[in-house]
Image: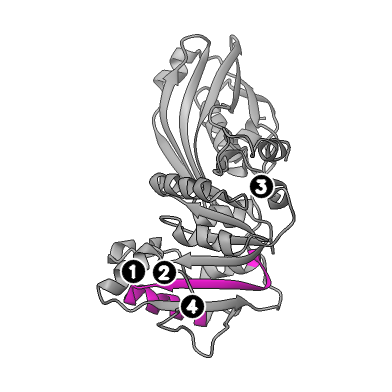
Amino acid sequence: MIFENFWFSTYNSPMTSSLLPAPQLSWPVNWHDIFGREAALLLEIGFGGGHFLVDLAQKRPSANVLGVEISLPALDRAQRKIKTGVLGNVRLLQSDARYLLQALCAPESLAEVYINFPDPWPKARQLHRRLINVDFLHLLATRLVPGGLLDIATDHADYALAITEALEATPYFRSRLATTFVTEDNERLRTKYEQIGLAEGRICHYYKWERRKTAVPNQYPVPKEFPMPHVVLHSPLNLDEIQAQYGRWQFSVDNCHINFMELFRAKAEDALFVETYIKEEPVTQRLGLVIRQREPGNYVISLHELGFPRPTLGVQRAIGQLATWLLGLHEEATLLHHNLQPEVLEREVNHAA
C-alpha cells in the first residue's frame, strides 16, 4: 500500500507513465488509491491496439479504466494513445487475466468487464489456453459487483460456440438481451481486429451479459504472502560437497508445481544460488533460493530478493523441499530452526528436527 500511494503521488510527473508496476502491486490492489479517487472500475482484458480502451476512457470520464495486456508492443501503443489524449483515468498492466483477477482484484471490485476478440487458439492442442470457460466465468463473477456488466466479442465461429456453451452453463450470469448473443452491434467502436474480420466476411458474435445478484461462492481467494521464509540447519558437508551432489529435480503438491533448475556458486560469498520455477494458481514465479553458509557446518536456506519475489506458500514449500534434500545428504545433518508453515516441511524434515 505504501508503494501504491507513492506511485500515485508521482503519476502526474512527466517522467511517469500510465503503466503500473505489476510485480510490486499489493494483493489485492486498492484501486481507489491507484487512481486517486473513488469511481467505478472498468476493465478491458486484452486491449490490443488500445482503440476500444481509449474510446471507453473518453466516453466514461467519471469511471476508472484499467487495461490488461501481455504484449509489450500493444502496451507501448496504448501508452502513446493515452498520452496523446491526455487521459488521466486510464491505467495499464502487463499481466495475464487470471492473475489480475484473482491476485490484484478483491471480490466485487469490478463494475464492468470487456473482452474483445480474445485469442481463439484454434488448434486442438491449444484449446486449453483459451481464456473463456466455465471456470473463468466463475472467477470473474466473484470479482464483479452484483449486476456488473460483461461484454464479449469474437469473430471466430468455433470459439463463439464454446463461449455460448460456457455462458449458458454458468449460473452466475444472464444475458441482457433476449438472446445469448447478437451478430450486429452498431453502438460500439469497431476494433482493428473487428474491422479485419468483417472485411474478410467473418460473422462477429457480441455477448452482452451481467452478473446475477445472487451470491457467488468464492473458490478463488486472493493469494496470501508470508514473512520472508528461512530454514537454519547443520550439516557436516561443505559447499563443494553439497554442490557436487546437486541435480535438477521437480515435484508437485496440492496444485503447486516446483522445478529446481540450475545451481550456481557465488564468487563473493559462501553461498549457492538455486534457480527455481514455482507455479501455483494464479501466481507463476521464477526466482532464486539461496543456501548460505554462516559458519562451517551452519547453513541458512532463504529466498533471494532479486526481482521482487512474492513469499507465497509455494515459495515456502520450495524452501522446505530444498531443506529436506540437504538434510538427506548426511545422516548427521539436523534441523535447527525454521519459520515455515507447519504443513510445509516434509515428514522427514520434521522427523529430523
For discs 1 and 4, the disc positioned in front in the rendered view: 1
Please state which of residues 314 and 49 is positioned toward the viewer in this rendering: 49
Number of numbered discs on residues: 4
Q: Residue at x 68, y 40 (%)?
A: 8
Q: Are marks 2 and 3 in contact (CB under 8 Å)?
A: no
Q: Residue at x 63, y 42 (%)?
A: 25
Determine whether 237 is above or below 117 in the image. above
Q: Earlier in the sequence, mark 2 or mark 1?
A: 2
Q: Earlier in the sequence, mark 2 or mark 3?
A: 3
Please state which of residues 338 and 264 is positioned toward the viewer in this rendering: 264
The residue where tag 1 is placed is 195
Q: Amino acid at mark 3?
A: Trp
Q: Residue at x 39, y 60 (%)?
A: 129
Magenta stretch bounds = 142-168
The residue where tag 2 is placed is 190
Q: Is residue 209 left or right of residue 6?
A: left
Q: Are marks 4 and 2 in contact (CB under 8 Å)?
A: no
Gap in angstroms between the C-alphas marked 2 and 3: 34 Å
Q: Earlier in the sequence, mark 4 or mark 2?
A: 2
Q: Amino acid at mark 2?
A: Arg
Q: Are marks 3 and 4 in contact (CB under 8 Å)?
A: no
Task: Give neighbour class at mark 1: few <14, some 14-19, many 20+ (Cα, 10 Å).
Answer: few
Helix, strand or loop under label 3: loop
Q: Residue 259: x, y in percent?
A: 44, 39
The residue where tag 3 is placed is 27
